[in-house]
């Protein structure tokens, strides 16, 4: 495993993906690292003009992204004026908007009795409110482009509640609900709205921080692998590229009739308790 500040390289699996996004404009929030960054690099390689918004732009990865033509913009999605500016900039500079990936997210590992109001606001505003308002700002542009695709990065925690991070689980469950609601409301506009629900993803800032907060880094890493049947079988966690590939599919013409879905990319974690090893 490596730190999230290292460049995310496209996996051999993704180098075979052949999806044509030429002429399409995509906005990705939280695109400076992890899943968002892998998605930005993949979409750009597929021909899209990609605009990344993040409040923590890493000079190394920014330079690499800009060298391949990805536009990076400082954006705190909790500041709705900044979120709107990111989306409007992409639409104005390219004359259209086709794809919005609401991906920026934060975790909070605390029991209900320990949670402060400010922490609730921080998680819900980032994971849920920003996705709602991102959609609000994007929809008029998507309609002008003749339709489009919104993908929300939810989580395995959006499918099954978890005991250790109730606020995060609530935010992601609500995000799955938001996805289905928007899908229903905007099918008439040819706007498809879906979400991905990853299990533990390695080589992300979020996972690195979670592991560093544990007393025994290696044991915690092994526990994450053990928690999902396929991860256990492959002896590794999910990679950001594997989530990016699912996001790419959902934004592609191959998914023209797919809306309101929540795709689990969790190695079977949400299926139930795996059999003993
Ligand atoms: P990450 O920490 O590498 O990426 C998250 C990005 O969001 C970071 O670049 C961060 O700077 C950005 N961000 C956070 N708050 C922001 C804000 N207010 N404004 C703008 N940018 C902000 O981790 P990741 O795993 O790639 O996370 C992407 C998404 O995947 C998140 O929504 C997360 O909840 C979800 N997810 C992650 C995992 C995992 O195991 N890593 C599992 C399930 C779901």
Image: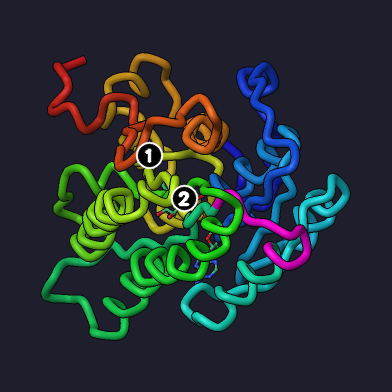
Q: Is residue 94 magenta?
A: yes
Asked which quadrant contains residue 248, the reply is top right
Secondary structure of the residue carrying tag 2 is: strand
Q: For mark 2, what is the residue?
A: 150
**Whether residue 100 is situated above or below residue 226 in the rendered picture:** below
First to last magenta residue range = 91-99
Q: Position of residue 7 (x, y in %)?
A: 72, 44
**Label 1 beta carbon within 8 A of ligand 1:** yes
Pointer 1 residue:
198
Q: State which mark lies toward you, 2 or 1.
A: 2
Q: Quadrant of the C terminus?
A: top left
**Left or right relative to 48: residue 263:** left
Count of numbered circles on the image: 2
Residue farthest right in this picture: 67
Colouring rule applied to residues: rainbow
Q: Position of residue 245 (x, y in %)?
A: 54, 30
Q: Is residue 247 above or below residue 120?
A: above
Relative depth, front residue between 78 and 187: 187
Where disc 1 sits, the SS reads strand
Q: Nearer the viewer, residue 158 or 48?
A: 48
Q: CA distance from mark 2 to mark 1?
A: 17 Å
Residue 101, percent from left and from top: 52, 52
Q: Residue at x 37, y 39 (%)?
A: 198
Query: Could you tell whether 232 is left or right of 67 in the image?
Result: left
Picture layout, residue 113 above or below residue 167: below
């Amino acid at each position: 495993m490596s730190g999230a500040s290292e460049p995310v390289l496209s996996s051999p699996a993704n180098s075979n993906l052949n999806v044509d996004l030429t002429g399409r404009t995509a906005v990705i929030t939280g695109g400076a690292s992890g899943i968002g960054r892998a998605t930005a690099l993949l979409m750009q390689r597929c021909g899209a003009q990609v605009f990344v918004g993040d409040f923590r732009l890493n000079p190394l990865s920014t330079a690499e992204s800009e060298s391949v033509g990805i536009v990076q913009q400082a954006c705190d999605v909790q500041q709705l004026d900044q979120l709107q500016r990111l989306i409007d900039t992409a639409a104005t500079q390219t004359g259209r908007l086709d794809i919005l990936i609401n991906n920026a997210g934060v975790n909070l590992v605390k029991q209900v009795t320990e949670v402060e109001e400010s922490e609730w606001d921080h998680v819900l505003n980032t994971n849920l409110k920003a996705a709602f308002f991102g959609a609000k700002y994007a929809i008029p542009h998507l309609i002008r482009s003749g339709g489009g695709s919104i993908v929300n990065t939810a989580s395995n925690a959006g499918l099954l509640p978890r005991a250790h991070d109730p606020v995060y689980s609530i935010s992601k469950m609500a995000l799955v609900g938001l996805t289905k609601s928007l899908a229903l409301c905007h099918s008439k506009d040819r706007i498809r709205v879906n979400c991905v629900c990853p299990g533990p993803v390695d080589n992300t800032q979020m996972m690195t921080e979670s592991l560093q907060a544990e007393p025994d880094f290696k044991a915690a890493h092994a526990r994450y692998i053990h928690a999902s049947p396929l991860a256990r079988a492959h002896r590794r966690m999910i990679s950001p590229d594997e989530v990016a590939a699912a996001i790419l599919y959902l934004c592609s013409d191959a998914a023209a009739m797919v809306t309101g879905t929540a795709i689990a990319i969790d190695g079977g974690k949400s299926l139930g308790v795996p059999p003993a090893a």
